[in-house]
């Protein structure tokens, strides 16, 4: 995907809307519903600076958790523990020296070694919350993650509604139950403005895509992020609303002062801003031992992606993004 040059108003909500995507994603069921899963401080490697300067390049993790707490499915036995998985995960490199942001999807089905058995990447979050996800990111990519943003189903809907909806091209006809309110939502293919409920359906639906369903869903998630950025770029009056909603609803270890400093720095240099979008390896098959559909763990390819990101280059061609 080509780099996109964004306006000043765009960057002012870039970080907040990236977490919205997260697209989307099949997220938590509310800001206060997963506190038992979250630790107060993010894990960093023993060799990493535990208090990194946001004036230098750093990585953050954007997570969408699929906890059913507070949804129409919370009484189902499989969700009785109230715990969620990192259903959508994006590794985001922020470079405030070159005003480059690189957003990389980490497929939820990526194989990991979890307590001596083969499991999916999203199992780490289910067992150990955001710390577990960050530890697995380090093992997979070698990247130290310092900050995170984590949003949920209802929170995502509220963020989209706060912006007055998001306009995207819905690639195919979709029909799905709104997991928060319970009603059946139908979307027709074509460009349209989606409210929060509709946007969450667009972010979660994957069964209509045929092959590479999950990778194509993540394309939709990123499309929603871009739509939010473009909308705020056209209406700077939405900036304060978006920032306020993000700080209120997202589970994060970044302070409002830090976020404001980043926003100000990038906004003042908006003419230099570049954003790249990419995905990690997503090819896979059914694991004969566990019976799970697992994405092949390809650390060599991940090394190429991270090397490109660290060099300020576009990593989107390393793993081809599927057409939706």
Image (cartoon, rainbow, N blue to C red):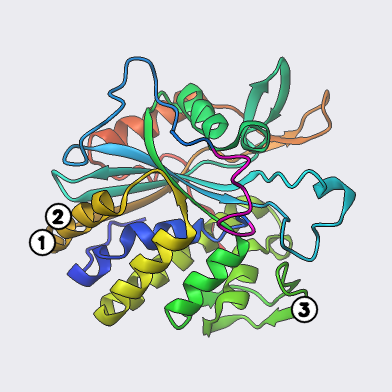
Residue at position x 72%, y 23% in the image: 118
Looking at the image, can residue 222 be seen? no
Q: Would residue 36 be counted in the magenta stretch? A: yes
Looking at the image, can residue 304 be seen? yes
Q: Which residue is mark 1?
A: 268
Q: Quadrant of residue 312?
A: top left
Mark 2 burial class by Cα count in 10 Å: few <14, some 14-19, many 20+: some
Instruction: Determine whether label 2 and label 1 are within 8 Å by CB.
Output: yes
The N terminus, quarter of image: bottom left
Q: Quadrant of residue 114?
A: top right
Left/right of residue 283 with respect to residue 146 in the rendered view: right
Mark 1 burial class by Cα count in 10 Å: few <14, some 14-19, many 20+: some
Find the distance from the CA under tag 2 to the CA under tag 3. 43 Å
Image vertical order of residue 214 relative to residue 165, above or below: above
Q: Would residue 178 be counted in the magenta stretch? A: no
Q: Secondary structure at mark 2?
A: helix
Q: Which residue is mark 2?
A: 265
Left/right of residue 316 with respect to residue 271 in the rendered view: right
Rendered image: mark on residue 184: 3
Instruction: Determine whether label 2 and label 3 are within 8 Å by CB.
Output: no
């Amino acid at each position: 995907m080509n780099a996109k040059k964004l306006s000043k108003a765009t960057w002012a909500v870039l970080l907040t809307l990236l977490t919205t995507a997260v697209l989307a994603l099949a997220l938590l069921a509310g800001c206060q519903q997963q506190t038992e899963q979250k630790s107060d401080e993010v894990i960093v490697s023993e060799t990493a600076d535990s208090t990194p300067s946001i004036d230098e390049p750093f990585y953050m993790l954007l997570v969408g958790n699929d906890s059913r707490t507070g949804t129409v499915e919370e009484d189902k036995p499989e969700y009785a523990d109230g715990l969620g998985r990192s259903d959508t995960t994006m590794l985001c490199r922020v470079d405030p020296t070159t005003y480059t942001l690189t957003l990389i999807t980490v497929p939820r089905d990526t194989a990991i070694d979890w307590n001596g058995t083969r499991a999916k990447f999203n199992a780490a979050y289910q067992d150990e919350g955001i710390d577990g996800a960050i530890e697995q990111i380090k093992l997979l990519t070698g990247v130290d993650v310092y900050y995170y943003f984590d949003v949920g189903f209802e929170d995502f809907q509220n963020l989209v509604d706060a912006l007055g909806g998001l306009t995207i091209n819905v690639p195919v006809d979709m029909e799905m139950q709104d997991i928060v309110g319970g009603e059946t939502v139908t979307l027709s293919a074509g460009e349209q403005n989606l409210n929060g409920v509709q946007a969450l359906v667009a972010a979660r639906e994957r069964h209509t895509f045929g092959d590479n369903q999950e990778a194509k869903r993540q394309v939709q998630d990123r499309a929603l992020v871009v739509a939010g950025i473009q909308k705020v770029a056209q209406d700077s009056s939405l900036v304060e609303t978006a920032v306020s909603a993000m700080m209120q609803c997202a589970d994060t270890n970044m302070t409002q002062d830090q976020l404001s400093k980043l926003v100000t720095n990038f906004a003042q240099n908006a003419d230099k801003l570049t954003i790249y979008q990419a995905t990690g390896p997503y090819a896979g098959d059914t694991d004969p031992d566990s019976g799970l559909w697992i994405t092949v763990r390809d650390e060599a390819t991940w090394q190429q992606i991270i090397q490109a990101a660290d060099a300020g280059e576009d990593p989107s061609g390393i793993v081809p993004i599927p057409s939706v």
